[in-house]
Image (cartoon, rainbow, N blue to C red):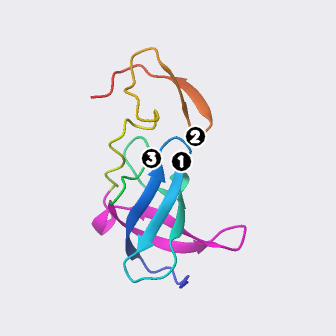
Amino acid sequence: MDVDGARKAGTVKWFNDVKGFGFITPDDGGEELFVHQSSIRADGFRSLGDGETVEYVIENGSDGRTKAADVTGPNEAPVQGSTRGGGAGGRKLMPGMIVERGGAVSMAYEEDT
């Protein structure tokens, strides 16, 4: 994989909102790239929608494998993200509901719409 810092385009193959990771299929072919929620540029909850078009740079992870970093929507816009309920495993968030996001437990104060 080319780790040259140039932005690339791809499509989200799948993304697990609860676990905070997934894979991107590069538009130019090649191996699927791992993506972690911490590498996503988003407004609010960081997630990706299956089939979403994204841009990214390729980095070498600490394990030596390549991964997607600085993941955005087209033209470096924030990603659209998942439509499956904001990381609540597909459940609708209700006020007072305890939810886990990225290893942190928090309380939902507003109902998702």
Question: In this rendering, is residue 111 above or below 19?
Answer: above
The circle drawn on residue 102 is 2
Residue 31 screen position, x and y as percent: 52, 77
Residue 89 screen position, x and y as percent: 46, 35
Distance from disc 1 to disc 2, alpha carbons, whole Å, reads 7 Å
The circle drawn on residue 20 is 1
Tell me if 59 is positioned left or right of 56 in this view.
right
Q: Is residue 2 magenta?
A: no
Q: Secondary structure at mark 2?
A: loop
Q: Identify the amino acid type marked 2.
A: Gly
Tell me if 86 is positioned left or right of 80 in this view.
right
Near mark 1 (Cα within 10 A), the count class, few <14, some 14-19 or many ≥20, is: some
- The residue positioned 34% from the left and 55% from the top of the image is 79
Question: In this rendering, is residue 19 above or below 60?
Answer: above
Q: Which residues are magenta?
A: 52-77
Q: Identify the amino acid type marked 3.
A: Arg
Q: Seen from this angle, which residue lies furthest right? A: 63
Q: Are marks 1 and 2 in contact (CB under 8 Å)?
A: yes
Q: Sequence order check: which comes first, mark 2 or mark 3?
A: 3
Nearer the observer: mark 3 or 1; the answer is: 1
Distance from disc 3 to disc 1, alpha carbons, whole Å, reads 8 Å
Q: Identify the amino acid type marked 1.
A: Gly
Q: Sequence order check: which comes first, mark 3 or mark 1?
A: 1
Q: Sequence order check: which comes first, mark 1 or mark 2?
A: 1
- The residue positioned 33% from the left and 65% from the top of the image is 76
- The residue positioned 50% from the left and 72% from the top of the image is 32
Q: Secondary structure at mark 1?
A: loop
Residue 109 screen position, x and y as percent: 41, 19
Near mark 2 (Cα within 10 A), the count class, few <14, some 14-19 or many ≥20, is: some
Residue 22 screen position, x and y as percent: 51, 57
| Towards the viewer: 91 or 76 | 91
Q: Which residue is mark 3?
A: 46
